[in-house]
Image: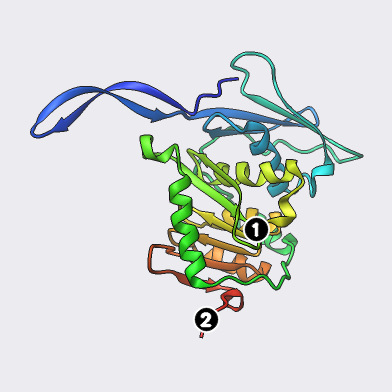
Amino acid sequence: MPTDPTTSLPVHRLKDGSLTREDAVVIVEEPLEIIVDGISYVSIMRTPGDDIALAAGFCLAEGLVDRAEDLGSIQACELEDANQVSVIRAGDHTPPEARRRAPVASSCGLCGRDMIDDLLQRLPRIQTDARVATADLLALGDRLQEAQQLFRPTGAAHAAALFDAELEFLSVAEDIGRYTALDKAVGRLLLAGRLAQARVAVLSGRCSFEMVQKVARAGIPIVASVSAPTALAIDCAKRAGITLVGFLRRETMTIYAGEGRIADLQ
């Protein structure tokens, strides 16, 4: 399977009033097929790399598994350019129905009011005494930016970082998509048996309903995004008992839900 997240392509850049020919670093976007119990479940557009973690995090978010032990086996196809990961769940499970047969764009989320209502009802409610100060949250935003190795040369990668109760890095991942970056970060910890240590998720882009849903499935109580959440994401966070922070910038933030976990809130 291809593993290079970037490639170099010739471009023309306008500098000082004239066009010059240069090589530009461009982020790669390719489909990944996730096969669950022998059934082609979904094809996702993603940046190559961490495909095993991506599949694990995706299966957790989808409710196909609830813990690492449910992943009986998970492996990438050894055929060149296959772009497939096969997940065989442990124990007895109802065969999954194919979610989407056509490749899903890296920015694509859930559709359908009935599906959303059903997911909201099934989300676990997070109950924890985890707390964080505003200054510490602002610092985490800076640390996420510093960790974005793919964004610097390409300008086209999203990132997700997970931190523990002491606000130490647990996992950080980048991808062409917001959803796939978060799935990779969560999947790494799930496979390592360390997901229960995660207390804060920091995201590089807009916080939609599906992003909060993924955080809820991972059991993470605090999520902060450098951009805005949607109204449905706020509703989801309130129902799941998640602290939701948006517009996390160098000196500002907006708290939309779960303000009780912000230690210095007056």
Residue 265 numbered tag: 2
Q: Residue at x 38, y 63 (%)?
A: 250
Image spot of residue 180 (x, y percent)? 57, 41
Nearest the eye: 206 or 141:
141
Nearest the eye: 251 or 166:
166
Q: Is residue 150 left or right of residue 190?
A: left
Residue at mark 1: 164
Nearest the eye: 112 or 27:
27
Dot 2 or dot 1: first in sequence order is 1
**Which residue lies most toward the bottom here?**
266
Q: Residue at x 64, y 53 (%)?
A: 214
Q: Is residue 35 left or right of residue 245?
A: right
Crowd class of label 1 (few under 14; some 14 to 19; many from 20; radius 10 Å): some
Secondary element type, mark 2: loop
Q: Amino acid at mark 2?
A: Leu
Crowd class of label 2 (few under 14; some 14 to 19; many from 20; radius 10 Å): few
Image spot of residue 78 (x, y percent)? 69, 16
**Which residue lies most toward the top here?**
80
Secondary element type, mark 1: loop
**Which residue lies most toward the left here?**
17
Compute the Cα span from label 2 to label 1: 21 Å
Q: Amino acid at mark 1?
A: Asp
